[in-house]
Image: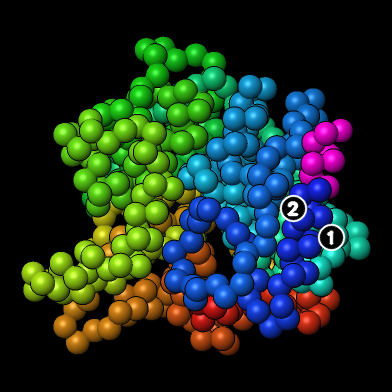
Amino acid sequence: MHAVRDHERAVDTLRRSYAAVPAGEPVRLAKQTSNLFRPRSAPRTPGLDVSGLTGVLAVDPAARTADVQGMCTYEDLVDATLPYGLMPLVVPQLRTITLGGAVTGLGIESTSFRNGLPHESVLEMDVLTGAGEIVTTGPHGEHADLHRAFPNSLGSLGYATRLRIELQPIGRHVSLRNIRFTRLEELVDAIGEVVAKGAWGGEPVDAMDGVVFSPGEAYLVLGAFTDEADDGPSDYTGQEIYYRSLRRRTRDALTAYDYLWRWDTDWFWCSAAFGVQHPVVRRLWPRRYRRSDVYHRIVRLEHRHRVAARVDRWRGRPARERVVQDVEVPLGRTPEFLRWFAADVGMTPVWLCPLRLREPSGPGSAKAWPLYPLRPGETYVNIGFWGSVPIAAGSADGDVNRQIERMVSEVGGHKSLYSDAYYDRGEFDRLYGGDIWRAVKDRYDPDHRLTGLYEKAVSRA
């Protein structure tokens, strides 16, 4: 009962802070962390008070559900579910991603080849709408339109204050097979077999992702949930670095907790930019600061003060374009896209994460997600690449990202919107359900107090 009362008070505080924002002023959340890479204008008004919406309200191990506040991080959510031998159906890679953020902004991980994206496991949500009302949404009923349009709306339709999600069992350990491929077509065939059979080489697969170092060196990591670890689990929170282990170990095991956060310790491989992968620096850099939110704060400071950019100019080096993207490419077109990316962009390594909607569904069904319309029954591969490239002579900042957008559309894919986007409005509306978004926007935010989706994703409002 205390948790319910505290939650009700937190929601009331949020509503009052929303009502206090003057008409015409942008509405933002007041939060300490962010996993976005979209530049935004400086806020002119205080953000919405979500300080009381950061916890887990209840875990029901019998029903395998959890009631979670919208600003609860997956780190805190996992801490609450693992003691029951349970996990969310999809746990995004970084600790400080919030459940509400993963639903309104999308998320993905290695269970997505059978569990889809985080919003597909949401049974119901309480949403603060642009009209200042709290409505409870679900796959069916009066507010099903908001439930379906909420994923990938990026806060343009409202903010989730409470979500009830499904959970799944996980063992105490995750047993891993690191399979090397020298041909991308063979890797794609293996992904297809795992999706079809839930197994590869006669062994079950509960989780699947991969890394491409080059078109001739790629790894598929196949995980199985288990209560046993034959040789004891590995530890990649110390001197060893997880992604490097794929090249030297064909078999591995991690505790369930360390598996879920295996990419967070080094922000995949991006910690190298801060020197954290150097053995001496790594020994001096405290473990508690080897985590994605620390690295992200450093990046934000660099964006603000441009110290590295000024040093590069002083040394005569070319300016650099940030290329931080996740894209979904149909499985059959994945080798084509990866070879183009290696030749024309040249960033390495890149992350692979197969995914598909949980259930085949037709237009207008409860499983249709119009603002990120993946085709039911089709397997996609999320391809993630995070870094920067030098701006070539005669080119401009943004040119490489525009080329990537064109190529993603050419192969029938989609691009996540947490980072830079350059689409014109017509193309954006075609790709991201503009007509449906406008209809839902007019119903739940009739005065358009919340910043629009295009303005958030492309205009950087």
Visible residue check, residue 56: yes
On the rendered structure, is 188 left or right of 135? Answer: left
Q: Which residues are magenta?
A: 1-8
User: Is 69 or 3 nearer to us in this picture?
Assistant: 3
Secondary-structure class at tag 2:
strand
Give the quarter of the image for residue 68. Answer: top right
Distance between mark 2 and mark 1 Cα atoms: 9 Å
Name the image quarter holding residue 201.
Answer: top left
Query: For residue 90, what is the image quadrant?
Result: top right
Question: Which quarter of the image is occupied by the C terminus?
Answer: bottom right
Residue at x 27% of width, y 30% of height:
240
Please name the colour scheme applied to the rendered image: rainbow
The answer to which of 279 and 390 lies nearer the viewer is: 279
What residue is shown with label 1? 134
> What's the residue type where badge 1 is placed?
Ile
Residue 239 drawn at (x, y percent): 26, 29
The reply to whether the magenta stretch includes residue 6 is: yes
Question: Does residue 334 sit above or below 264 in this rendering?
Answer: below
Q: Position of residue 246 (x, y in %)?
A: 30, 35
* Residue assigned mark 2: 161
Residue that appears at 42% across and 56% down: 383
In percent of width and height, residue 320 lies at 24, 71
Q: Tell me if 452 is positioned left or right of 329 in this view.
A: right
Q: Nearer the viewer, residue 120 or 343?
A: 120
